[in-house]
Image (tube, rainbow, N blue to C red):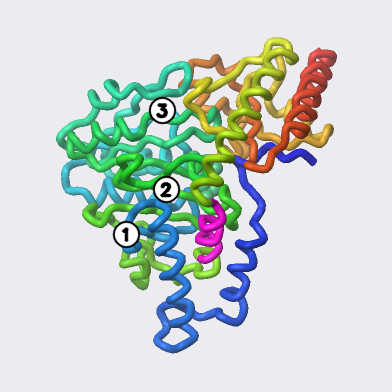
Amino acid sequence: MIYLDAAATTPVKREVLEAMWPYLTGEFGNPSSHHGVGESASRALADARRTLAEWLGCRPAEVVFTSGGTEADNLAVKGIALGNPRGRHVVLSAVEHPAVVESVEFLERMHGFAVSVVPVDRYGLIDPDAFAEVLRPDTTLATVMTANNEIGTVQPIARLGEIARAAGVPFHSDAVQAAGWLDVRLDSLGVDALSISGHKLGAPKGVGVLAVRQRLLLEPVVHGGGQERGRRSGTENVAFAVGLAAAVRSMSPADVAAAAARTTALRDEFIGVVLREVPDARFTGHPQLRLPSVASFCFPGTSGEAVLLQLEERGVIVSSGSACAAGSDDPSPVLLAIGLAPEVAQTAVRFTLTPDTTRDELTAAAHALRDSVAALAALR
Ligand code: PLP
């Protein structure tokens, strides 16, 4: 099998599982318990929190463990927008993940928020001037993802952060796809809050982080026993937090930079082969300002789903559109936002590389793709 769907999920790394194991078995304590078993769990959680804080360039107290990227996005959007007394207006880009989009729609529906959507150009990039224009004195939150999960486009987050800061608007970024490839420290990105998900990084599904500056008022979404400094109640998932920290420790900045450079070169070679060998293939996203890992295309005249199945028969695992829009046949709002016609958007296929993807795998995948599209054309 050639797995080219790393943006959907990644396997748990061995060192991650080994780090987690003790906290699922012998060291099984509840970190809130006032006895030795609990204290050992509490120490492990604190240690994991320190690792995450160091990686994200924030204080340990600014790390909130969540059940994943979706919950981190929900907590950021609802928590900051509702916690901030400035007003009832939120800003988001036209290419956000459903976890952000649906949270904003909730605020609109249930709390009467006004919403401004900042459009993107044909590459999926937002224009900083257009972003600046929609910020208002009553804007309680602006949220723009660091990198897009469908087309890989990387936004000018640091510039947007400067604009938001000058306007006094709290700024959140969903960095679920960027983490592991780009520098995601809060200060480098110029954000006040950042969402991360473990299962994109070799940690298990079901753990994530919202890093959020302490000065922001954050209204909790999950109420209960007051864990995570009252920002996210519920007994902490110690083993998964330890696993996420182990995944982070396994990625030194030097390794990440080297993997990004290597993967970018392989990705560009792959894109070139596909555009040469697959008739009518259309590349989506920005040619340079994109994640090293993402090669995304449309194949007009096919359907993304049919290409996916053809590729799977040939041993190549990819995604059609976004795995996050589970079960949806509607064309992706992201692809519509970059100006594709609905019938072209339906033909989207995304290949996402891991740091271990090889040139041979990509050569085989490109040939399988050429054969798949040809097989579908023969059926028409
Ligand atoms: N945000 C982005 C950009 C994503 O790609 C994903 C998942 O693919 C999520 C959020 C949701 O993360 P999780 O699967 O951990 O809930």
Q: Is mark 2 within 8 Å of ligand 1?
A: yes
Location of residue 94 by image quarter: top left
Q: The N terminus is located in which quarter?
A: top right
How many discs mark residues in the rendered view?
3
Which range is magenta? 242-251
Location of residue 366 by image quarter: top right
Q: Is residue 375 left or right of residue 98?
A: right
**Which secondary structure is most common in the magenta stretch?**
helix
Name the residue: 76% across, 29% down.
365
In this rendering, the answer to whether 175 lies above or below 65 is: above
Name the residue: 26% across, 38% down.
113
Q: Position of residue 261 (x, y in %)?
A: 56, 34
Name the residue: 46% across, 69% down.
236
Can you tell which mark lies on residue 94? 3
The residue that disc 1 covers is 59
Kind of residue indicated by mark 3: Ala
The residue that disc 2 covers is 195
Q: Residue furthest top?
A: 280
Q: CA distance from mark 1 to mark 3?
A: 31 Å
Kind of residue indicated by mark 2: Ser
